[in-house]
Amino acid sequence: MSPRRKIANRMIAVGCVLLIAAVIWLLYNLNRDWDAKQASNAILEELDEAISESVYHDSMADGSPEFPDDMDTINIDGVEYVGYITIPDLEVELPVTKTWSLDKLKISPCRYSGNVENNDLVICAHNYRSHFGRLRHLENGAAVRFKDVHGTVTLYRVVASEILQPTAIEDMTVSDADLTLFTCTYGGWTRYTVRCERVKK
């Protein structure tokens, strides 16, 4: 066999190995996305039922619920949730945990900082297709809703988007936006960030 033929065969073999690795990686990511979607849906169902019960009990109490600097929560399976987010244009409705961690991000979006009452809420999520993976498709004017554990719905609209570096924590958390959503771009090197303003009733 000629040297040129040997090189061609090696290149074909390397190409096949890379193709197989890419398919395995794709299947792995699809499986993680599916698991995250199932987990989020199960939690959302429990959370919505708990919020309905909370609204009933609040309506029976004297006065309205107070909203301190920190957000009230509902505990489901040992995890505290502050409510859930709905993005109609992406057909996404997801629970939001009170604090973030890598383990929590595998299940649902997480509050990164801030809160609704102070108009500085920041929510992060993995770029799973079923979570925030399609944020880049949101256009200015798109609606975003957040429902807290008392059943109060706050409506936002998208006003801007930007790419931030992972180290730009202050730029992420300190802005004029009433609500910020972000996720990793593919490869994880930067953060795709969507800024929203609160819609006055």
Image (tube, grey):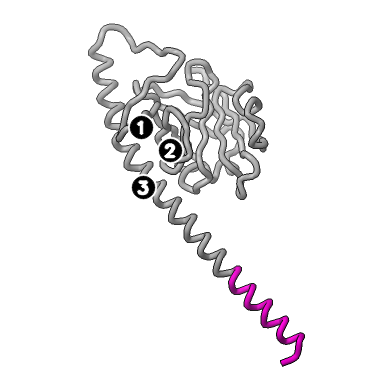
Q: In the image, what residue type sits under mark 2?
A: Lys
Label 1, on which residue? Answer: 79
Tell me, yes or no, whether the two marked residues, 2 and 1, touch with CB atoms within 8 Å: yes
- Left or right of residue 19: residue 45: left
Instruction: Give the mark nearest the N terminus, 3 or 1.
Output: 3
3 or 1: mark nearer the eye: 1
Instruction: Assess whether mark 2 and mark 3 are in contact (beta carbons under 8 angstroms).
Output: no
Name the residue located 44 percent from the left edge and 43 percent from the top edge: 106
Q: Is 65 within the magenta?
A: no
Tell me the crowding category of disc 2: few under 14, some 14 to 19, or many 20 or more residues within 10 angstroms, Cα based. some
**Label 1 is placed on what type of residue?**
Val
Q: Pick the quarter of the image with the N terminus.
A: bottom right
Residue that badge 3 annotates? 38
Q: Which label number is shown at residue 5?
A: none
> In the image, which is nearer the foreground, mark 3 or mark 2?
2
Q: Earlier in the sequence, mark 2 or mark 1?
A: 1
Q: Which residues are magenta?
A: 1-18
> Is 86 drawn above or below residue 117 in the view shown?
below
Q: Measuring 51% from the left and 31% from the top, which residue is drawn there?
A: 123
Residue 122: x percent and y percent? 53, 27
User: To which residue does mark 2 refer?
Assistant: 104
**Local crowd at mark 3 within 10 Å, few (<14), some, or many (≥20)?**
some
